[in-house]
Image (cartoon, rainbow, N blue to C red):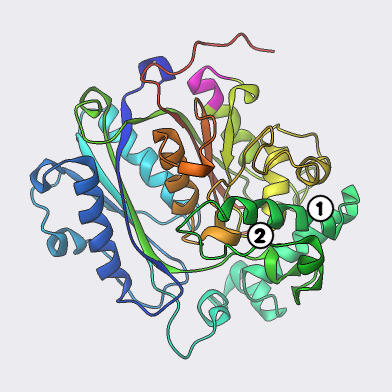
Amino acid sequence: MSARGTHAAITGLGHAGLTRKATPGAGVLATEAIRSAISDAGLKFEDIDGLLVARSGGAFEKEPDLDLQKVVGLRDLRLLQLLHCEGASAIQMVQTAAMAIAMGMVRHVVCVFADAALQPGKRTSESFGRIISVQGLRGLRYSSGLIGGVASHAMIAQRYMKQYQVTSEHLGAVAISNRRWAQLNPDAVLRKPLTMEEYLASRLIVEPFRLFDCAMPVNGAIAVIVSAADQAADLRQPPVYIYGMGQGHRGYPNQAGYPELSTGATLCGEMALQMAGLRVADINQAQIYDAFTFNTLLMLEAYGFCEPGQAGPFVLGGATAPGGSLPTNTGGGHLSGFYLQGMTPVAEAIVQARGQAGERQSRNDVVLATNEGGQFDYHACLLVGPHKNGLPARAPV
Protein backbone atom coordinates (compact mmCIF):
# COMPACT_ATOMS: atom_id res chain seq x y z
CA MET A 1 0.00 0.00 0.00
CA SER A 2 1.73 3.20 -1.12
CA ALA A 3 0.69 6.74 -0.30
CA ARG A 4 -0.53 7.09 -3.87
CA GLY A 5 -2.97 4.27 -3.23
CA THR A 6 -3.93 5.15 0.34
CA HIS A 7 -6.90 3.10 1.53
CA ALA A 8 -7.55 4.74 4.90
CA ALA A 9 -7.71 8.12 6.58
CA ILE A 10 -8.21 9.30 10.15
CA THR A 11 -11.48 11.21 10.23
CA GLY A 12 -12.41 11.65 13.89
CA LEU A 13 -10.65 12.65 17.11
CA GLY A 14 -12.17 12.84 20.57
CA HIS A 15 -10.85 13.04 24.09
CA ALA A 16 -12.03 13.06 27.69
CA GLY A 17 -10.27 13.95 30.91
CA LEU A 18 -6.61 14.72 30.16
CA THR A 19 -6.23 15.90 33.73
CA ARG A 20 -4.16 15.24 36.83
CA LYS A 21 -7.29 15.48 38.95
CA ALA A 22 -9.61 12.69 40.06
CA THR A 23 -11.92 11.40 37.32
CA PRO A 24 -14.39 8.61 36.69
CA GLY A 25 -12.91 5.23 35.72
CA ALA A 26 -11.22 4.47 32.44
CA GLY A 27 -14.37 2.89 31.02
CA VAL A 28 -16.39 6.07 31.50
CA LEU A 29 -13.61 8.17 29.98
CA ALA A 30 -13.36 5.83 27.00
CA THR A 31 -17.11 6.12 26.39
CA GLU A 32 -16.94 9.92 26.45
CA ALA A 33 -13.97 9.98 24.06
CA ILE A 34 -15.70 7.64 21.58
CA ARG A 35 -18.85 9.73 21.50
CA SER A 36 -16.74 12.86 21.03
CA ALA A 37 -14.82 11.29 18.13
CA ILE A 38 -18.02 10.19 16.36
CA SER A 39 -19.40 13.71 16.66
CA ASP A 40 -16.09 15.22 15.54
CA ALA A 41 -16.20 13.17 12.35
CA GLY A 42 -19.82 14.01 11.66
CA LEU A 43 -20.78 10.34 11.70
CA LYS A 44 -23.72 8.55 13.26
CA PHE A 45 -23.43 5.66 15.70
CA GLU A 46 -24.85 3.29 13.10
CA ASP A 47 -22.01 4.24 10.72
CA ILE A 48 -19.42 2.64 13.04
CA ASP A 49 -18.73 -0.98 12.12
CA GLY A 50 -15.49 -1.57 14.01
CA LEU A 51 -14.19 -1.03 17.54
CA LEU A 52 -10.61 -1.57 18.74
CA VAL A 53 -9.75 -1.13 22.42
CA ALA A 54 -6.35 -0.74 24.09
CA ARG A 55 -5.76 -0.71 27.83
CA SER A 56 -2.92 0.54 29.96
CA GLY A 57 -0.51 -2.09 31.21
CA GLY A 58 -0.48 -0.22 34.52
CA ALA A 59 -4.23 0.11 34.92
CA PHE A 60 -5.75 -1.25 38.13
CA GLU A 61 -9.23 -1.78 36.77
CA LYS A 62 -10.25 -4.28 34.13
CA GLU A 63 -12.25 -1.86 32.05
CA PRO A 64 -12.55 -0.86 29.30
CA ASP A 65 -13.07 -4.22 27.64
CA LEU A 66 -15.16 -5.65 24.82
CA ASP A 67 -18.35 -4.73 26.68
CA LEU A 68 -17.55 -1.15 25.70
CA GLN A 69 -19.53 -1.88 22.54
CA LYS A 70 -22.69 -2.23 24.63
CA VAL A 71 -21.92 0.69 26.94
CA VAL A 72 -21.39 3.09 24.04
CA GLY A 73 -24.40 1.79 22.16
CA LEU A 74 -22.71 0.33 19.08
CA ARG A 75 -24.41 -2.50 17.20
CA ASP A 76 -23.67 -5.04 14.49
CA LEU A 77 -19.90 -4.52 14.51
CA ARG A 78 -17.87 -6.36 11.89
CA LEU A 79 -14.63 -5.91 13.83
CA LEU A 80 -14.21 -6.01 17.62
CA GLN A 81 -10.88 -6.58 19.32
CA LEU A 82 -8.79 -5.89 22.41
CA LEU A 83 -5.24 -5.00 21.44
CA HIS A 84 -2.31 -4.93 23.84
CA CYS A 85 1.29 -4.21 22.86
CA GLU A 86 2.08 -1.90 25.79
CA GLY A 87 3.03 1.59 24.58
CA ALA A 88 2.83 0.54 20.93
CA SER A 89 -0.88 -0.30 21.14
CA ALA A 90 -2.33 3.01 19.92
CA ILE A 91 -0.63 2.99 16.54
CA GLN A 92 -1.17 -0.74 16.17
CA MET A 93 -4.89 -0.12 16.55
CA VAL A 94 -4.80 2.42 13.73
CA GLN A 95 -2.78 -0.02 11.62
CA THR A 96 -5.22 -2.87 12.29
CA ALA A 97 -8.14 -0.64 11.33
CA ALA A 98 -6.40 0.46 8.12
CA MET A 99 -5.67 -3.14 7.12
CA ALA A 100 -9.26 -4.21 7.82
CA ILE A 101 -10.51 -1.33 5.68
CA ALA A 102 -8.13 -2.28 2.87
CA MET A 103 -9.55 -5.82 2.92
CA GLY A 104 -13.11 -4.55 2.72
CA MET A 105 -14.17 -5.73 6.19
CA VAL A 106 -15.19 -2.34 7.58
CA ARG A 107 -15.68 1.32 6.66
CA HIS A 108 -15.40 3.26 9.94
CA VAL A 109 -13.42 1.92 12.92
CA VAL A 110 -13.13 3.54 16.35
CA CYS A 111 -9.79 3.07 18.14
CA VAL A 112 -9.74 4.05 21.82
CA PHE A 113 -7.27 4.10 24.70
CA ALA A 114 -8.16 5.11 28.24
CA ASP A 115 -6.34 5.24 31.54
CA ALA A 116 -7.27 6.41 35.03
CA ALA A 117 -4.21 5.36 36.96
CA LEU A 118 -4.03 8.53 39.08
CA GLN A 119 -6.18 7.91 42.12
CA PRO A 120 -6.61 9.92 45.35
CA GLY A 121 -4.19 8.82 48.04
CA LYS A 122 -1.90 6.97 45.62
CA ARG A 123 1.43 8.17 44.29
CA THR A 124 2.10 8.00 40.56
CA SER A 125 4.86 5.44 41.17
CA GLU A 126 2.28 3.07 42.68
CA SER A 127 0.41 3.05 39.37
CA PHE A 128 3.35 2.70 37.03
CA GLY A 129 5.83 0.77 39.18
CA ARG A 130 3.94 -2.43 39.86
CA ILE A 131 5.47 -5.89 39.82
CA ILE A 132 3.82 -7.71 36.92
CA SER A 133 5.34 -11.17 37.27
CA VAL A 134 7.81 -12.88 39.61
CA GLN A 135 8.24 -15.96 37.45
CA GLY A 136 10.45 -16.80 34.48
CA LEU A 137 12.47 -14.30 32.47
CA ARG A 138 10.13 -11.39 33.26
CA GLY A 139 10.63 -11.95 36.97
CA LEU A 140 14.43 -11.57 36.90
CA ARG A 141 14.32 -7.78 36.82
CA TYR A 142 12.08 -7.61 39.91
CA SER A 143 14.19 -10.03 41.94
CA SER A 144 17.16 -7.73 41.33
CA GLY A 145 15.19 -4.67 42.46
CA LEU A 146 14.63 -3.23 38.99
CA ILE A 147 11.04 -2.08 39.46
CA GLY A 148 9.25 0.43 37.24
CA GLY A 149 9.90 1.92 33.83
CA VAL A 150 12.10 4.73 35.15
CA ALA A 151 14.75 2.36 36.51
CA SER A 152 14.89 0.09 33.47
CA HIS A 153 15.07 2.96 31.00
CA ALA A 154 17.64 4.74 33.16
CA MET A 155 20.06 1.81 32.78
CA ILE A 156 19.79 1.95 29.00
CA ALA A 157 20.18 5.73 29.08
CA GLN A 158 23.38 5.46 31.11
CA ARG A 159 24.82 3.06 28.56
CA TYR A 160 23.91 5.45 25.73
CA MET A 161 25.30 8.52 27.50
CA LYS A 162 28.61 6.83 28.25
CA GLN A 163 29.00 5.46 24.73
CA TYR A 164 28.34 8.78 23.00
CA GLN A 165 29.46 11.31 25.64
CA VAL A 166 25.92 12.60 26.05
CA THR A 167 25.48 15.08 28.90
CA SER A 168 22.67 16.08 31.23
CA GLU A 169 22.42 19.31 29.24
CA HIS A 170 21.53 17.27 26.16
CA LEU A 171 18.70 15.58 28.06
CA GLY A 172 17.65 18.95 29.44
CA ALA A 173 17.46 20.38 25.94
CA VAL A 174 14.76 17.82 25.11
CA ALA A 175 12.71 18.77 28.17
CA ILE A 176 13.06 22.47 27.38
CA SER A 177 12.11 21.99 23.73
CA ASN A 178 8.96 20.12 24.78
CA ARG A 179 8.09 22.81 27.32
CA ARG A 180 8.40 25.54 24.70
CA TRP A 181 5.89 23.68 22.54
CA ALA A 182 3.61 23.06 25.55
CA GLN A 183 3.41 26.79 26.16
CA LEU A 184 1.58 26.97 22.82
CA ASN A 185 -0.81 24.12 23.66
CA PRO A 186 -3.82 24.98 25.86
CA ASP A 187 -4.32 21.26 26.66
CA ALA A 188 -0.78 20.79 28.01
CA VAL A 189 -0.39 19.97 31.71
CA LEU A 190 2.89 21.86 32.19
CA ARG A 191 3.09 25.29 30.52
CA LYS A 192 5.37 27.27 32.84
CA PRO A 193 8.67 28.20 31.11
CA LEU A 194 11.56 25.86 31.92
CA THR A 195 15.21 26.94 31.96
CA MET A 196 18.30 24.77 31.87
CA GLU A 197 19.15 25.92 35.39
CA GLU A 198 15.73 24.79 36.64
CA TYR A 199 16.07 21.48 34.84
CA LEU A 200 19.50 20.76 36.35
CA ALA A 201 18.27 21.75 39.82
CA SER A 202 15.27 19.38 39.71
CA ARG A 203 15.51 16.28 41.86
CA LEU A 204 16.93 13.02 40.61
CA ILE A 205 14.43 10.18 40.18
CA VAL A 206 16.82 7.46 38.97
CA GLU A 207 20.19 8.58 37.63
CA PRO A 208 20.47 10.09 35.02
CA PHE A 209 16.76 11.00 35.01
CA ARG A 210 15.59 14.08 36.84
CA LEU A 211 12.00 15.09 37.46
CA PHE A 212 11.65 16.84 34.10
CA ASP A 213 13.10 13.88 32.20
CA CYS A 214 9.98 11.85 32.98
CA ALA A 215 6.51 11.74 31.45
CA MET A 216 3.57 13.53 33.05
CA PRO A 217 0.73 10.96 33.46
CA VAL A 218 -2.91 12.02 33.31
CA ASN A 219 -6.30 10.43 33.63
CA GLY A 220 -7.99 10.51 30.28
CA ALA A 221 -9.03 8.86 27.05
CA ILE A 222 -8.46 9.52 23.37
CA ALA A 223 -10.44 7.97 20.53
CA VAL A 224 -9.77 8.21 16.81
CA ILE A 225 -11.84 7.06 13.87
CA VAL A 226 -10.19 5.43 10.87
CA SER A 227 -12.33 5.48 7.73
CA ALA A 228 -12.17 4.30 4.16
CA ALA A 229 -10.34 6.99 2.20
CA ASP A 230 -13.05 7.22 -0.45
CA GLN A 231 -15.52 8.42 2.19
CA ALA A 232 -13.21 10.66 4.20
CA ALA A 233 -13.56 13.83 2.14
CA ASP A 234 -17.34 13.89 2.72
CA LEU A 235 -17.03 14.00 6.50
CA ARG A 236 -16.81 16.96 8.88
CA GLN A 237 -13.05 17.25 9.43
CA PRO A 238 -10.09 17.52 7.04
CA PRO A 239 -8.99 13.92 6.40
CA VAL A 240 -5.62 12.76 7.69
CA TYR A 241 -4.42 10.20 5.16
CA ILE A 242 -2.23 7.28 6.18
CA TYR A 243 0.75 7.26 3.80
CA GLY A 244 2.75 4.47 5.38
CA MET A 245 3.10 2.43 8.54
CA GLY A 246 5.42 -0.09 10.10
CA GLN A 247 6.30 -2.19 13.11
CA GLY A 248 9.63 -3.38 14.50
CA HIS A 249 10.20 -5.71 17.44
CA ARG A 250 13.80 -6.36 18.40
CA GLY A 251 13.46 -9.59 20.39
CA TYR A 252 16.03 -10.46 23.03
CA PRO A 253 18.63 -7.66 22.96
CA ASN A 254 21.65 -9.26 24.60
CA GLN A 255 22.53 -11.88 22.02
CA ALA A 256 25.95 -11.70 20.43
CA GLY A 257 26.10 -8.97 17.82
CA TYR A 258 22.81 -7.39 19.00
CA PRO A 259 23.70 -4.28 21.03
CA GLU A 260 21.51 -3.16 23.92
CA LEU A 261 20.86 0.21 22.28
CA SER A 262 19.19 -1.34 19.27
CA THR A 263 15.44 -0.88 18.87
CA GLY A 264 12.81 -1.86 16.34
CA ALA A 265 12.55 1.75 15.18
CA THR A 266 14.97 1.49 12.26
CA LEU A 267 13.13 -1.51 10.78
CA CYS A 268 9.82 0.20 11.43
CA GLY A 269 10.86 3.46 9.77
CA GLU A 270 12.30 1.76 6.71
CA MET A 271 9.05 -0.16 6.25
CA ALA A 272 6.86 2.93 6.53
CA LEU A 273 9.01 5.03 4.20
CA GLN A 274 9.13 2.31 1.59
CA MET A 275 5.36 1.92 1.76
CA ALA A 276 4.88 5.66 1.32
CA GLY A 277 7.55 6.04 -1.37
CA LEU A 278 9.29 8.70 0.73
CA ARG A 279 12.65 9.49 2.32
CA VAL A 280 13.57 10.67 5.80
CA ALA A 281 14.20 14.13 4.36
CA ASP A 282 10.53 14.34 3.34
CA ILE A 283 9.32 14.22 6.95
CA ASN A 284 8.36 17.69 8.19
CA GLN A 285 7.80 16.94 11.86
CA ALA A 286 8.08 14.09 14.37
CA GLN A 287 5.69 13.11 17.17
CA ILE A 288 7.85 10.74 19.21
CA TYR A 289 6.84 8.50 22.10
CA ASP A 290 8.90 10.20 24.79
CA ALA A 291 8.27 8.56 28.13
CA PHE A 292 11.73 9.97 28.94
CA THR A 293 13.93 12.63 27.36
CA PHE A 294 16.41 9.94 26.35
CA ASN A 295 13.78 8.28 24.14
CA THR A 296 13.67 11.32 21.88
CA LEU A 297 17.44 11.30 21.36
CA LEU A 298 17.52 7.59 20.59
CA MET A 299 14.59 7.80 18.16
CA LEU A 300 15.96 10.80 16.27
CA GLU A 301 19.00 8.66 15.53
CA ALA A 302 17.13 5.42 14.87
CA TYR A 303 14.94 7.08 12.23
CA GLY A 304 17.93 8.67 10.52
CA PHE A 305 17.43 12.33 11.40
CA CYS A 306 20.85 12.30 13.11
CA GLU A 307 23.92 10.11 13.14
CA PRO A 308 24.42 7.96 16.28
CA GLY A 309 25.47 10.16 19.18
CA GLN A 310 24.53 13.43 17.42
CA ALA A 311 20.93 13.87 18.56
CA GLY A 312 22.00 15.67 21.74
CA PRO A 313 23.76 18.53 19.93
CA PHE A 314 20.93 18.52 17.35
CA VAL A 315 18.32 19.23 20.04
CA LEU A 316 20.57 21.53 22.07
CA GLY A 317 20.99 23.64 18.93
CA GLY A 318 17.23 24.20 18.74
CA ALA A 319 16.38 21.93 15.80
CA THR A 320 13.35 20.35 17.49
CA ALA A 321 11.99 23.48 19.20
CA PRO A 322 9.64 26.11 17.74
CA GLY A 323 11.34 27.59 14.68
CA GLY A 324 13.68 24.59 14.31
CA SER A 325 14.29 22.45 11.26
CA LEU A 326 12.43 19.39 12.66
CA PRO A 327 9.53 20.36 14.93
CA THR A 328 9.27 17.52 17.42
CA ASN A 329 6.53 16.74 19.95
CA THR A 330 4.77 19.95 19.08
CA GLY A 331 2.08 19.57 21.74
CA GLY A 332 4.62 19.19 24.53
CA GLY A 333 4.84 15.43 24.15
CA HIS A 334 4.60 13.16 27.17
CA LEU A 335 7.00 15.32 29.17
CA SER A 336 5.03 18.59 29.27
CA GLY A 337 1.83 17.89 27.33
CA PHE A 338 0.30 14.77 28.84
CA TYR A 339 1.21 11.10 29.06
CA LEU A 340 -1.58 9.02 27.62
CA GLN A 341 0.83 6.46 26.24
CA GLY A 342 0.81 6.01 22.47
CA MET A 343 -2.28 8.12 21.90
CA THR A 344 -0.41 11.31 22.78
CA PRO A 345 1.77 11.38 19.62
CA VAL A 346 -1.13 10.06 17.50
CA ALA A 347 -3.48 12.84 18.61
CA GLU A 348 -0.91 15.58 18.01
CA ALA A 349 -0.10 14.17 14.57
CA ILE A 350 -3.79 14.35 13.68
CA VAL A 351 -4.18 17.94 14.89
CA GLN A 352 -1.07 18.99 12.98
CA ALA A 353 -2.02 17.16 9.78
CA ARG A 354 -5.45 18.78 9.90
CA GLY A 355 -3.84 22.21 10.17
CA GLN A 356 -5.68 22.87 13.44
CA ALA A 357 -2.75 23.35 15.83
CA GLY A 358 -3.07 27.10 16.18
CA GLU A 359 0.10 28.83 17.39
CA ARG A 360 2.10 25.62 17.26
CA GLN A 361 1.09 24.69 13.70
CA SER A 362 4.07 23.46 11.69
CA ARG A 363 4.56 22.31 8.13
CA ASN A 364 2.51 19.14 7.82
CA ASP A 365 2.99 17.48 4.41
CA VAL A 366 4.45 14.39 6.11
CA VAL A 367 4.06 13.83 9.86
CA LEU A 368 5.78 10.95 11.66
CA ALA A 369 4.17 9.47 14.78
CA THR A 370 5.90 6.76 16.79
CA ASN A 371 4.96 4.37 19.60
CA GLU A 372 7.28 2.47 21.95
CA GLY A 373 6.43 -0.43 24.23
CA GLY A 374 8.29 -2.19 27.00
CA GLN A 375 11.98 -1.31 27.33
CA PHE A 376 12.32 -0.60 23.57
CA ASP A 377 10.90 -4.06 22.89
CA TYR A 378 7.95 -3.10 20.68
CA HIS A 379 7.76 -0.32 18.14
CA ALA A 380 5.18 1.01 15.67
CA CYS A 381 4.94 4.11 13.50
CA LEU A 382 2.70 6.01 11.11
CA LEU A 383 3.39 8.49 8.33
CA VAL A 384 0.36 10.72 7.81
CA GLY A 385 -0.56 13.95 6.08
CA PRO A 386 -3.35 15.97 4.47
CA HIS A 387 -2.79 14.94 0.83
CA LYS A 388 -5.02 12.19 -0.54
CA ASN A 389 -2.41 10.96 -3.01
CA GLY A 390 0.57 11.56 -0.73
CA LEU A 391 3.74 13.16 -2.03
CA PRO A 392 5.35 12.24 -5.35
CA ALA A 393 7.54 9.14 -5.18
CA ARG A 394 11.15 9.95 -4.45
CA ALA A 395 14.18 8.32 -6.03
CA PRO A 396 16.21 6.31 -3.49
CA VAL A 397 19.40 7.92 -2.22
Residue 274 locus on image (x, y percent): 54, 21
Question: What element does badge 2 sit on?
Answer: loop
Look at label 1 and name its amino acid: His
Residue 209 locus on image (x, y percent): 75, 67
Residue 124 locus on image (x, y percent): 54, 79
Residue at image location 17% in from the left, 40% down from the top:
42
- Between 220 and 64, the one lying in front of the other is 220
Can residue 373 be seen in the rendering of this structure? Answer: no
Q: Residue furthest top?
A: 395
- Between 66 and 178, the one lying in front of the other is 178
Image mark for residue 135: none
Can residue 158 be seen in the rendering of this structure? Answer: yes
- Quadrant containing the C terminus in the rendered view: top right
Q: Which residue is mark 2?
A: 292
Q: Which residue is mark 1?
A: 170
Q: Which residues are magenta?
A: 273-278
- 1 shown above or below 290: above
Measure how far apart labels 1 and 2 are at the Cα level.
Answer: 13 Å
